[in-house]
Image (spheres, rainbow, N blue to C red):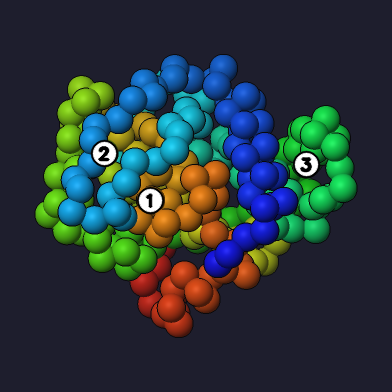
Amino acid sequence: MKLCMKKIWFMVLVALVLFALTACRGAGEPESAATPPSESEEHSEPADEADLSQSEDTGFTSPEDAVRSYFENQTGMIVAYFALLFGDEVDSDATEEERLAQFERVAARAEDYTLTLLGFVPPEALSEVYATESYQAFLAARAEEYDATQLVSRIAAFELDGETHLLFFDVIEFEEEWHIFQLGGSINMLLQLPPTLHGIPPEFMDALLGGVDLQTILIPA
């Protein structure tokens, strides 16, 4: 799943736009993080911790409900991210200012796209390391740093104009309420993806799943 430098640069730009457009919608999380276990390089720390949490101040009763709310309230962000990075909307010759304007235009007309949350893929289905005792201890340590009860990952499978994509979430629990902590996060680290690649488009799906039929591991939404 190698990506050219131009596309990686564009991922950085899109991630910055996502942060700029959503930072005002919720309280930001601290950017420091606990030092992960050293037994595997797959435990390495994420490059950034951009706050892309949902716009509501209230939490949710489960990690899945928090992700469902994100899909309901941040449709424009999801559509623009995937359409501009991997879809027909890509204009590799655009200037930075033109790219920013393009992002906002695509996000504003999200209703032109069909976006459907299909369900959830267990994190351990993509990386066995996620379920190990050492990695769970790492997540527990990160949760403790933020005075949270727990921190978990969720992988949302969704259809965008008839094609299946994956979007990665870290979800955190405060006082029995769940909130989106960040996009990408733990799953990005474990799959050793670029830090700005918060999900997987259709063209990378086979390589990521290793021939596994997504329907056999999908937990319906």
Q: Which residue is mark 1?
A: 189
Return the x and y of residue 9 as percentages of the image width and height: 67, 44
Q: Residues within 10 Å of mark 2 (few under 14, many from 20)?
A: many
Query: Which three-letter amino acid code belongs to the residue tagged 1?
Result: Met
Q: Which residue is mark 3?
A: 106
Q: Height in image: 192 above or below 196?
A: below
Q: Residues within 10 Å of mark 1 (few under 14, many from 20)?
A: some
Residue at image x 87%, y 48%? 93
Q: Earlier in the sequence, mark 3 or mark 2?
A: 3
Cβ–Cβ below 8 Å for labels 3 and 2? no
Q: Which residue is mark 2?
A: 151
Quarter occupied by residue 59: top left
Return the x and y of residue 135 as percentages of the image width and height: 20, 51
Quarter occupied by residue 105: top right
In whole angstroms, how far apart are the C-alphas of marks 2 and 1?
15 Å
Query: Which three-letter amino acid code belongs to the residue tagged 2?
Result: Leu
Residue at image x 17%, y 35%? 141
- Residue 26 shown left or right of residue 40 in the figure: right
